[in-house]
Amino acid sequence: MPISEQQWINIIRFFGDSTHVTSSPVIPYCAFATVNEDGSPRVAPYTSLVLGENAQGFYFDELSRRTTGNLERDQRVCVLIVKNRKWFWIKAVLFGKYLHPPGIRLMGRVGKKREATDREINAYKNPVKSLRMFKGYEPMWGFMKHGREIYFDDFETVQCGPIPELAHISKEEKRD
């Protein structure tokens, strides 16, 4: 069963940070899991995922040749997003429990590698535009030109210890 519109809205609200260029959230840190040619798993960090509408996203495919090769051969991907706001983690320590799931796994398939649009480039670069004057800007963000769509078709929240399930993005809602 595909991810419902309401589930996707809740996923974006909880795990995304909107940019000024678009209302699309840019996920600053996540991990992509792919399958190597020999069937073994491969996990790589990514910093360029932009969540869009209709359970879709876009990322810049410039940094990891092995991940790119894996996705050329097998388009399946699992993206792990972990909540990165410090107050989320401070509250967990203070209260001794998570008030919400600390992460989510989004499963889907990627599209063909293509040239990014100006809108996609701006959505990605806007959060770091104040760093343009520094030496590391160009090698880290300046060269991003090609990417892929991701079409998510399933998800699961990360559960750690005694965490109450979020009803508004739970798997049970998908089964109704």
Image (spheres, rainbow, N blue to C red):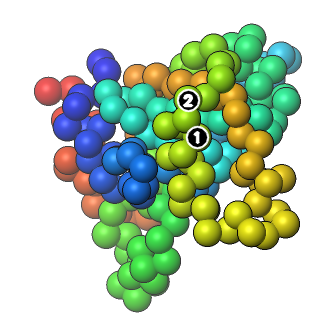
Residue at 26%, 53% (x, y): give it: 166
| 28 left or right, relative to 98 | right
Q: Quadrant of residue 40?
A: top right
**Percent coordinates x, y for residue 28 in the rendering:** 57, 56
Q: Mark 1 points at which residue?
A: 121
Q: What residue type is disc 2 on?
A: Thr
Using the image as rendered, state which of residue 102 and residue 85 is in the foreground.
85
Q: In which quarter of the image is residue 161?
A: bottom left
Using the image as rendered, state which of residue 45 and residue 121 is in the foreground.
121
Residue at 46%, 22% (x, y): give it: 151
Q: How many labels does the image show?
A: 2
Pointer 1 and pointer 2: residues touching (CB < 8 Å)?
Answer: yes
Residue at 50%, 46% (x, y): give it: 123
Q: Which mark is residue 117?
A: 2
**Percent coordinates x, y for residue 67 in the rendering:** 77, 29
Label 2, residues with CA under 10 Å away: few <14, some 14-19, many ≥20: few
Please identify the quadrant where the N terminus is shown: top left
Q: What residue type is disc 1 on?
A: Ile
